[in-house]
Image (cartoon, rainbow, N blue to C red):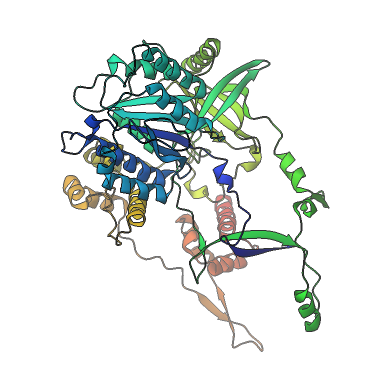
Amino acid sequence: MSTITEEYDTQDDSEKQNDPAEFYGVRDGTLFLIDTSSEMFNNNDDGIPLFVSCIEEYIYILKQKLVWNRQDWMGLILIGTETCDTDTKIENILTLQKLSPININKLKEAEKIRNNWKDYKSKSSSKQYPFQDTLWHAALSFSSINLTMSARRVILYTCHDVPPLTNENEKHRIRAKAATYSDSGILLYVVGLGNTWDAERFYKDLEMLSRNINKEDYQRTSYKDLLHQVKRPSRRMAKLPWRLGKDVVINVDICNVCVKSQDVKKMTMNSENNAPLVAYTYFQRKDSDTEEDEEDQERDEKITMPLLDADLRKMGEFGGEKIYFTLDEVKSFEKIFEMGIDMIGVKPFYCDPMYHLHAPYFVSCNKSCSKGEKLLFAALLDKCKKRNLIIICRVTLRKHSGSYLYNMIPMSDEGGFYLYKIPYNENVNNFTEEMYQYAFNDQDKKIPINDEGVQLFKQIIKKFSQIYDPERFPNPKLQVKLQSVETLALDLDVRDPPQDETLPMEDVLQERIGDLTKQINELFMPEENEFNPPDKKRYKKSGKSSDKSVVTYNDEDVLELVQQNKLDRCKVSDLQLFLRNAGLITSGRKIELIDRLYTHYRKNSDEN
């Protein structure tokens, strides 16, 4: 069977293609509500209208999300306007951007809204309106989406301490509507604008009701932290059951410690009209080859029907026999264990850094857990920390993915466990041969330590030490992406790339350390004579082939190289000559040839 890929113009293709990334993956949904009362068009301390500053914050977050994570959803709604949406006909609510996946077009529209902000000033309504309709409309925007979102946020920008009220009884209805947000998993954040805004008067109650927390547990999120949460991609990956034994389950959240930014997707374009193209892959049966050109031409002219997925087979060889599986059977192999974390056992704390080749996950207790589950989780965390134990478990993150072994390392200060992946026995590679000359132990081959060098490096580290602040070191690659997004959205000319703030200031660093680098070089990298292999001695053979010569080496020369540990500097051809003169096998990799010579000459040296 062979794979053939063809491209079709999407404008002429009526069949709509579904991107799996739209249905699977980690995504956030954020809906922005901006008050358009007349006070919102007053200038702030920087001389910018409050309404314009809100739109600029929306644009800033949208740019960041276009760089970080293109799966997130965002929407923009104005409240307190004279006009309203034609589909819902809810008074004083105008949707400028529906809650949908972010893209460049959203950014272009937001730029137009900011530039034409005076048009919305004229649409501001002077009459009071029921604020609970605003909360209901925001919840309706999320309820119409049938996708899993790790976070659903509603961010309200206003300069009023109390929302507009048609009567005093309306406060109760607003609180009741905010309480329903906790059942829908929607978090309400209120951003107060102006120097006299006070959250204690009313909006604090709405935030507590939407999160279903008590007054003692409530802690207001600063606007800086809120922006950091919204613009960065979601860290929460999944909600999984942690099975400790029979009928003992704790619901936990799995979060990423580090998040990788997503690159802009490449699109295939038609070279003639720049129309986007979509690629289709299908399989067809490959006929046996023939030698006659006429038969080849006839076969090419035949219309070959593509094979269906049900006709495809995947082959695996087991015990010398070829066994064929259907695609459904291959998928069923991945459904061995249920989703979740299965506890295997505990052991004393030991963490081998050689096995941990990626950033860990973080396991925390889910907020919706019962009081008993939270107490059990806290007790396990505390006991493992005090007794210096780690938990071995099997983790299955997705329904159709494999299961892997992990170490759960307690981090009581952070309220959870770090989840480090560990390999199965068959996946561990042996690097003994490749790293034999760098392997040290505490018996016969101790680590060489130079006390003078240690002191020099301590001085360098002390002079280079500084307090790390992530805000001082923006990712240069992300800054280039952000500039590209702005250039495409605003149709700007190509600009010079932004300055890389992560590059060290060499002049300042050199001034700090002085001549310490010179001392390091003199201590660890003295000038050595260039290595030259021993001179080759040629001996002529007698007979007909007297014009040819054979290259040989003295054993004393090879033994000297062995004692100086310089065999790795020789060429493979020289190593093979050494082995041939010693009567040893000359086949194998270079590392095997070196090991063979070391074993032979050191053994002879010990016997003598």
Nearer the observer, 456 or 337: 337
Q: Position of residue 345 (x, y in %)?
A: 62, 22
On screen, residue 83 versus residue 597, left or right, reads left
Count all numbered tags in the image, as a single digit.
Answer: 0
Which of the 4 quarters of the picture holds residue 118? top left
- Note whether residue 377 is visible: yes
Q: Position of residue 304 (x, y in %)?
A: 77, 67
- Note whether residue 452 is visible: no
Q: Residue at x 45, y 68 (%)?
A: 533
Q: Quadrant of the N terminus?
A: bottom right
On screen, residue 522 versus residue 9, left or right, reads left
Q: Position of residue 285 (x, y in %)?
A: 78, 64
Q: Residue at x 50, y 59 (%)?
A: 267
Nearer the observer, 72 or 136: 136
Nearer the observer, 391 or 276: 276
Q: Residue at x 19, y 22 (%)?
A: 196
Q: Is residue 43 above or below residue 532?
A: above
Nearer the observer, 137 or 92: 92
On screen, residue 96 versus residue 316, left or right, reads left
Q: Position of residue 12 (x, y in %)?
A: 59, 62
Q: Is residue 503 above or below residue 58?
A: below
Q: Is residue 370 above or below residue 126?
A: above
Which of the 4 quarters of the picture holds residue 415? top left
